[in-house]
């Protein structure tokens, strides 16, 4: 069976050729918290995700001094394709492959790939912080 890779390390200098199917994921505390997910196609040309990751991590996990932060890409469509080709034994009747493909596992509730940016509640409560996130990602409508 062909192996399908639906996650990859994010390299800002070498984005995927099909940004429509990829989401940028930011996490801290060694996966203990998903900071945000955003469709790659929404990032503007002046996006600075590395700076944003550092700022969010300083707010949430200053004690880690930047260790355990990750930027990576996730493709729900490729994840769904991988699940469709896999043999799943004892599949629950409530199993929803699409919901699982859009879910980002992590501590503090994980994250979700949506049509727009998803921001962890710790950061989304303050309008100034949300504005800074949008600024550093140079989000396009």
Image (tube, helix red, strand yellow):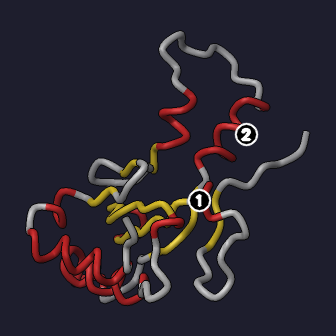
Give the x, y percent position of residue 92. Answer: 54, 14
139 relative position to 94: left or right: left
85 relative position to 55: left or right: right
Residue count near mark 2 (Cα–Cα under 10 Å), binned few <14, some 14–19, many ≥20: some
Residue at the spot 49% in from the left edge and 85% down from the top edge? 45
Residue at the spot 89% in from the left edge and 45% down from the top edge? 2
Give the x, y percent position of residue 88. Answer: 70, 23
Give the x, y percent position of residue 61. Answer: 24, 77
Give the x, y percent position of residue 81. Answer: 72, 38
Q: Nearer the viewer, mark 2 or mark 1?
A: 1
Residue count near mark 1 (Cα–Cα under 10 Å), binned few <14, some 14–19, many ≥20: many
Q: Name the image quarter holding residue 29.
A: bottom left
What whole-number distance in Å separates the C-alpha atoms at marks 2 and 1?
A: 15 Å
Q: Name the image quarter holding residue 49.
A: bottom left
Residue at the spot 37% in from the left edge and 73% down from the top edge? 139
Q: Considering only vertical position in the picture, is 92 above or below 19? A: above
Q: Earlier in the sequence, mark 2 or mark 1?
A: 1
Q: Which mark is residue 22?
A: 1
Q: Considering only vertical position in the picture, is 89 above or below 18? A: above
Q: Residue furthest front?
A: 141
Q: Which mark is residue 82?
A: 2
Is disc 1 placed on a helix, strand or loop?
loop
Q: Considering only vertical position in the picture, is 129 above or below 82? A: below
């Amino acid at each position: 069976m062909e192996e399908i890779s639906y996650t990859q390390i994010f390299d800002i200098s070498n984005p995927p050729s099909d940004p429509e199917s990829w989401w940028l994921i930011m996490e801290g505390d060694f996966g203990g918290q998903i900071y945000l997910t955003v469709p790659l196609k929404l990032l503007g040309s002046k996006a600075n995700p590395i700076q944003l990751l550092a700022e969010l991590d300083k707010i949430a996990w200053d004690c880690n001094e930047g260790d355990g932060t990750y930027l990576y890409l996730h493709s729900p469509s490729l994840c769904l394709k991988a699940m469709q080709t896999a043999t799943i034994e004892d599949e629950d009747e409530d199993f929803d492959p699409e919901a699982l493909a859009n879910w980002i596992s992590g501590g503090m509730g994980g994250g979700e790939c949506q049509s727009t940016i998803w921001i962890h509640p710790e950061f989304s409560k303050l309008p100034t912080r949300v504005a800074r996130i949008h600024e550093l990602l140079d989000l396009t409508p």
